[in-house]
Image (cartoon, rainbow, N blue to C red):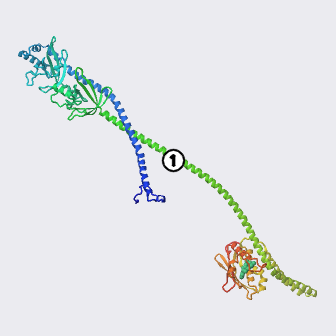
């Protein structure tokens, strides 16, 4: 989507006149969006960071708990193993502990000590020591005089013979005492062979005559350690490893040696020129019972059956009668792995729990929102219900009012209809009034004839002219019938119509009306012509009311032509679809425009007061409209007025 430069992304931009001051509104928006975004990011990241922190703490606690739990069992094993190692060491050394004493028991030794320069005595002592060495399986057995010089040795006749060497710098010479064995580990200065030295002073009375020394090899012990299941080391008072199940660590140190220690070692020529570098052991934790958790560096080229790298439990013990310390290492890597596994599981489990908790809280919040929405919906529904009830009540009352109004209207309509029908009747009676003079004239003629005929009849009867009397009386009958017809027509016209439509023949209706108007027509000499298509047309209307319309229209035509020489009325009718079209045309003056405009209005009349009411056309048009037709007026082409009407035909309707 194209976005104009400067519009913030992800937010619809409203075109608002209030912000139109040089686009500063947009700039403010951009400024306020950034902190919001930061807050939003913080709100998303904080719980995650918190959860990770909790998981890390849980993992750490689980690691420590599992580690400590496993450690107690491991400690017992380590302690037991240390006992075994210590015992094997003691046993190995203990075998040789008495041999320095044994030397003092031999006469050749004592004799040589008493007379050290005697070469025969020296030979005897050398031979003895050689035989003893062979017998007890030690590396060397030799004798020092009280100055620390070797005066006899088991290797007296070998290239590396100690005889004549001054070993007064060796601690076993310096510390040797009567009745006790001094122990020392060192590398031979002559043959560079490492060995374990056991020495004791040989004395007579209070005089120390010399020192008896046995040098023992610890290789076998070392070999047995190498095949053990975990590393073990023996370190001297300076921390130099003198014996180790890992060959690479031998003559390494547990801690870096300080100057004093290096000097002492150098003075005793204990390890010759060995570099005595630290083996790289680091103590991680000191435990309550003196054991330590350490990390071992591993040993290059080690072909031991055990691991020499990683976490170990180090348990040490000072070896009795020596300044040495035996340390046994127990591999903790499996334990460490197990604790790590548990830590990982606990961490993941806590993350899972926190996740579930978050989901649960989210669901609860969602549920609360749904409930709130539902409550709001219910409130809206209730509100709507009450509104609907109010509106229904208002509607009912409006309906009631409407019904009352309808009734009122119906009443008014009824009244109007009654009034109209009264008006129609009144107009009809008015027409009758207009006809009355003519009717009276129409009745007078037969009545006068009747009077004459009856008077003549009496005279002819007195003269005995019975045939003439009969002739007169026979002429009476049609006169009476004509009078009866006239009064009958009058009666039928004057009656109040029912208003119900029925099928009626147009021709008869025209004849009836012309009969009523006969006097007026003949008096004015009006020529009436009738032209009905097909001879007659059946109409669907109220005959009485239609007669009233015809009477009005023909009467108006007669009025309009009054006084003219040429008075003609032409009635024509034809079918137009479902209607009959009837035209009444006269030869009168026609309809000027101002008359045409107002002619159908009530009380419009051009006739003299008392002659016309001005209701004839209004009522006629109303009657035709009631039939479903139409009444219009116009001027005929050759002069005169034409009133045209359409009336539904009665075809197909039952009479
Ligand atoms: P009234 O006959 O009482 O005057 P109408 O409503 O019948 O009332 O007629 C209204 C007027 O229409 C008449 O006064 C007359 O001026 C005019 N009028 C009606 N018929 C004709 C006609 N055939 N020719 C000329 N004018 C007519």
Quarter that holds the N terminus: bottom left
Q: Nearer the viewer, residue 60 or 650?
A: 60
Which residue: 12% across, 26% down? 191
Up/down of 236 relative to 421, above or below: above
The percent coordinates of residue 467 (x first, y second) are: 88, 87
| Residue furthest right as drawn | 462
Counting other residues with Cα less than 10 Å from the Cα at mark 1, is it few (<14), some (14-19), or many (20 or more)?
few
Q: Quadrant of residue 65?
A: top left
Q: Nearer the viewer, residue 249 or 70?
A: 249
Q: Quadrant of residue 252?
A: top left
| Residue furthest front as drawn | 21
Label 1 sits on a secondary structure element that is helix
Q: Is residue 488 left or right of residue 157?
A: right
| Residue furthest left as drawn | 119
The percent coordinates of residue 67 (x first, y second) are: 34, 32
Image quarter for ligand 1 equals bottom right
The percent coordinates of residue 465 (x first, y second) are: 91, 88
Q: Is residue 105 left or right of residue 47?
A: left
Quarter that holds the C terminus: bottom right
Q: Is residue 218 left or right of residue 75?
A: left
| Residue furthest bottom as drawn | 565
Please say whether residue 508 is visible from this viewpoint: no
Up/down of 267 relative to 505, above or below: above
Q: Within 8 Å of ligand 1, the CB of disc 1?
A: no
Up/down of 229 relative to 27, above or below: above
Residue that label 1 marks: 370
Up/down of 269 relative to 610, above or below: above
């Amino acid at each position: 989507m194209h976005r104009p430069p400067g519009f913030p992304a992800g937010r619809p931009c409203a075109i608002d006149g209030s912000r139109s001051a040089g686009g500063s509104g947009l700039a403010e928006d951009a400024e306020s969006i950034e902190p919001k975004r930061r807050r939003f990011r913080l709100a998303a990241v904080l719980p995650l960071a918190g959860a990770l922190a909790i998981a890390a703490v849980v993992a750490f606690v689980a690691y420590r708990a599992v580690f400590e739990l496993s450690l107690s069992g491991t400690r017992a094993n380590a302690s037991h193993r240390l006992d075994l190692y210590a015992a094997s060491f003691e046993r190995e050394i203990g075998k040789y502990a008495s041999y320095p004493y044994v030397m003092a028991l031999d006469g050749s030794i004592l004799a040589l000590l008493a007379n050290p320069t005697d070469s025969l005595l020296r030979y005897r002592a050398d031979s003895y020591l050689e035989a003893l060495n062979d017998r007890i399986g030690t590396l060397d057995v030799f004798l020092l005089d009280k100055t620390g010089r070797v005066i006899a040795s088991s290797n007296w006749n070998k290239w590396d013979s100690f005889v004549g060497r001054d070993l007064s710098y060796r601690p076993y010479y310096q510390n040797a005492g009567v009745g006790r064995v001094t122990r020392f580990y060192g590398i031979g200065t002559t043959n560079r062979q490492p060995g374990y030295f056991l020495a004791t002073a040989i004395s007579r009375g209070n005089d120390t005559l010399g020192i008896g020394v046995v040098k023992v090899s610890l290789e076998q012990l070392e070999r047995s350690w190498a095949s053990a299941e975990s590393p073990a080391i023996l370190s001297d008072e300076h921390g130099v490893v003198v014996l180790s199940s890992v060959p690479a660590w031998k003559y390494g140190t547990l801690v870096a040696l300080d100057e004093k220690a290096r000097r002492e070692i150098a003075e005793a020529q204990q390890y010759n020129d060995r570099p005595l570098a630290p083996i790289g052991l680091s103590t991680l934790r000191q435990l309550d019972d003196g054991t330590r958790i350490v990390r071992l560096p591993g040993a290059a080229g080690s072909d031991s059956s055990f691991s020499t790298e990683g976490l170990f439990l180090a348990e040490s013990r000072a070896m009795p009668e020596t300044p040495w310390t035996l340390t046994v290492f127990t591999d903790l890597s499996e334990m460490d792995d197990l604790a790590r596994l548990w830590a990982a599981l606990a961490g993941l489990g806590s993350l899972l729990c926190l996740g579930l908790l978050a989901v649960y809280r989210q669901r609860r919040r969602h549920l609360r929102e749904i409930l709130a929405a539902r409550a709001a919906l219910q409130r809206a529904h209730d509100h709507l219900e009450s509104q609907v009830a109010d509106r229904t009540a208002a509607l009912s009352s409006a309906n009631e009012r409407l019904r009352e109004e309808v009734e009122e209207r119906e009443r008014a309509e009824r009244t109007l209809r009654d009034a109209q029908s009264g008006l129609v009747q009144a107009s009809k009676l008015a027409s009758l009034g207009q006809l009355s003079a003519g009717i009276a004239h129409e009745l007078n003629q037969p009545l006068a004839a009747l009077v004459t005929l009856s008077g003549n009849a009496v005279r002819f009867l007195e003269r005995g002219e019975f045939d003439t009397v009969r002739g007169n009386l026979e002429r009476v009958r049609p006169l009476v019938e004509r009078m009866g017809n006239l009064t009958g027509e009058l009666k039928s016209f004057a009656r109040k119509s029912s208003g119900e439509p029925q099928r009626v023949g147009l021709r008869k209706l025209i004849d009836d009306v012309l009969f009523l108007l006969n006097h007026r027509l003949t008096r004015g000499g009006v020529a009436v012509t009738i032209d009905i298509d097909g001879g007659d047309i059946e109409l669907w209307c109220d005959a009485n009311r239609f007669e009233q319309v015809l009477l009005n229209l023909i009467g108006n035509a007669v009025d309009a032509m009054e006084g003219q020489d040429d008075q003609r009325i032409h009635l024509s009718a034809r079918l137009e679809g479902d209607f009959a079209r009837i035209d009444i045309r006269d030869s009168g003056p026609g309809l000027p425009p101002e008359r045409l405009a107002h002619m159908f209005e009530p009380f419009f009349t051009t006739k003299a007061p008392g002659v016309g009411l001005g209701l004839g056309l209004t009522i006629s048009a109303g009657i035709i409209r009631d039939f479903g037709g139409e009444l219009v007026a116009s001027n005929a082409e050759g002069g005169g007025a034409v009133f045209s009407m359409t009336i539904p035909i009665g075809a197909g309707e039952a009479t």
